[in-house]
Structure formats: C-alpha cells, structure tokens
Image: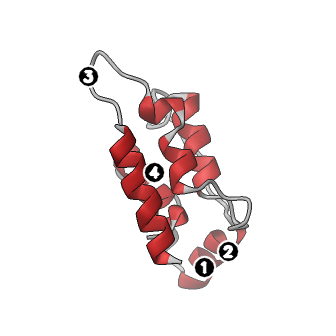
Amino acid sequence: MDIWACGVILYILLVGYPPFWDEDQHRLYAQIKNGAYDYPSPEWDTVTPEAKSLIDSMLTLNPKKRITAEQALRVPWICVSSPQWGVTPTASLIETFSNVTVWLR
C-alpha cells in the first residue's frame, strides 16, 4: 500500500471522515489531484501538530518527496511511548515495514 493511501486512512482514523470530499465527482478528483485538504474545527482542534505534520508528509503529492514507511515509523508521534497506550514500535516492526516497501516496488 502506498504511503499516500496510509495518510488518507490515518486522517480518517483521527476524525472519522476523509480528507477529500465533494458530492461532485469532478470537484472531488480536482481536490485529490491538487492535494487540497485542511484540518477543520472542531474535529481537528484536539489533534496534535505532530500528527498533522505526519499526515502532511504522507499526503505530499510528489511521491519522490513523500515520507517513506520507514521514515514514518520513526516519527516521534508514532514511536514515542505514551502513558495512555504504553507501546512503541519495535525494531522488528520497522524491519517488517521496510521489507513490505521493498516488496511493493
């Protein structure tokens, strides 16, 4: 799966709706092609800037400038322990995602 698609999924998981939406299919495609999304209130008011930054780096239009799976797994928002969750990605998880990325190429 492409990191861009993962960014769309992460956006949905955080607020419950997609980053791109329009009832008109042509306008929807234009939003997607232009990377036109935002973080509207009130849903995004409680989401951290770090999470938004990760989404921005995942939804970068140019695939060559887009964050990789390995880089995304090293973003502090993902890998720093949280008392609330008590988990961090392990080295094996990072290795697994790196292998998947190579396999998808």
Say which of 15 and 54 sits in front.
Answer: 54
Q: Which residue is mark 1?
A: 29
Horizontal side, residue 3 vs residue 56: left or right = left
Q: Identify residue for label 3.
A: 86
Q: Residue at x 53, y 46 (%)?
A: 72
The quadrant of the image that shows the N terminus is bottom left
Between discs 4 and 1, the one toward the N terminus: 4
Q: Name the mark nearer the viewer: 2 or 3.
A: 3
- Relative height, residue 38 to residue 100 (above, below): above
Is residue 44 found left or right of 81 in the rendered image?
right
Where does label 4 land, which residue? 11
Evaluate if marks 2 and 1 touch, with contact meaning CB atoms under 8 Å apart. Answer: yes
Q: Amino acid at mark 1?
A: Tyr
Instruction: Please rate how many residues cluster around mark 2, counting C-alpha atoms within 10 Å: few if below 14, some from 14 to 19, many from 20.
Output: few
Which three-letter amino acid code belongs to the residue tagged 3?
Gly
Looking at the rendered structure, the kind of residue marked 4 is: Tyr
Please tell me whether mark 2 sits on a helix, a strand or a loop.
helix
Circle 4/circle 1 CB separation < 8 Å: no
The nearer-to-camera label among 1 and 3 is 3
Amino acid at circle 2:
Lys
Q: Position of residue 94 (x, y in %)?
A: 42, 47
Which residue is found at the position 63% from the left and 48% from the top? 56
Q: Which residue is mark 2?
A: 33
